[in-house]
Image (cartoon, rainbow, N blue to C red):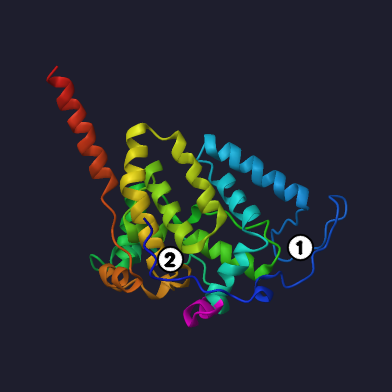
Amino acid sequence: MLWVSRPYRLLPLQRLEAPHPKHYFSVLSRPPRNYPGHVPLTLVERNALAAGSAIIAFFNPRRGDLIATLGETTATPFFIYRLRDMMLSSPTGRRILRDRPRITSQTMSLTSLRSLPDKSVGRVYASWLDQEGVTPDTRSSVRHIDDEECAYVMQRYRECHDFYHALTGLPVVKEGEMALKAFEFANTLLPMTGLSLFAVASMKPIERSRFWNIYLPWALRNGFQSQEIINVYWEEQLERHVDELRRELGIEIPPNIREIRKRAKQAKIEAAGKR
């Protein structure tokens, strides 16, 4: 059963098309780069990279570089323009596109964030990073999206991913990543987030059961009903109470994965001891 309280806006088709006509080229005559690090791809190269990164990432979901490549090669020509237009339709989204903020350890002082009050967005974000052992600098730069503005949109989505983790409390274990990817798919419709769910097949039976019965329903309900998370100006929300922001966005906290896994492990130990 799906809960849909925020219908997706139908945008004019002409706005979803690439701003420039397609240029067909060969690997020996690539067009100029549209931004630093940009690597234009032929259609064959794009499809090959998408297929290869999807297959390898299925067997090794910790390969963040391949997941990033899959995201870029499957987001065009339609989906990344749709996400960009979602930002253009929002006053806050337009400011983000104009200001082009970046989320790195240089632009966000973790020391300052750790000194914020408990339950503030910034403190919750810093605590989540510390607990999971990650930093804001783990996101690679976009390379394979041709439009420069859309490349920034993908970069912004990528760098905000850990804020989504902190806001929902989902850890970086496979169950947490799959739950968050399902949430992101319902909220953004980026193909990579949906394709990543094939990795559920590689999870343990008990983990798959929890995903289908607990976390997928939570992800679809919250992803569809919440506001577009790409339009959150996180840099301006750091001192707000995190529960207030959750209520404003319409996001519920899912059951704690680590606590569920801990209880399941303890129950298994107790059952083994009674034999």
Can residue 53 be seen here? The reply is: yes
- The structure residue drawn at horizontal position 66% and vertical position 75%, both measured from the top left corner, is 15
Which mark, residue 267?
A: none
- Residue 128 image offset from top left, x and y in percent: 33, 54
Does residue 169 sit above or below 88 in this rendering?
above
- Residue 165 image offset from top left, x and y in percent: 38, 56
Q: Which residue is mark 2?
A: 108
Seen from the viewer's position, the closer of residues 214 and 5 is 5
Seen from the viewer's position, the closer of residues 130 and 200 is 200
Q: Which residues are magenta?
A: 88-96
Q: Amino acid at mark 1?
A: Arg
Question: Is label 1 in a helix, a strand or a loop?
Answer: loop
Q: Which residue is mark 1?
A: 33
> Does 95 appear in magenta?
yes
State the separation of the CA atoms marked 1 and 2.
Answer: 29 Å
**Image check: 254 left or right of 84?**
left
Q: Earlier in the sequence, mark 1 or mark 2?
A: 1
- The structure residue drawn at horizontal position 63% and vertical position 64%, both measured from the top left corner, is 151
Kindly report the secondary structure that dominates the magenta region of the rendered protein. Answer: helix
The answer to which quarter of the image holds residue 240 is: bottom left
- Residue 197 image offset from top left, x and y in percent: 48, 45
> Does 137 appear in magenta?
no
Quadrant where the C terminus lies? top left
Question: Is label 2 in a helix, a strand or a loop?
Answer: loop
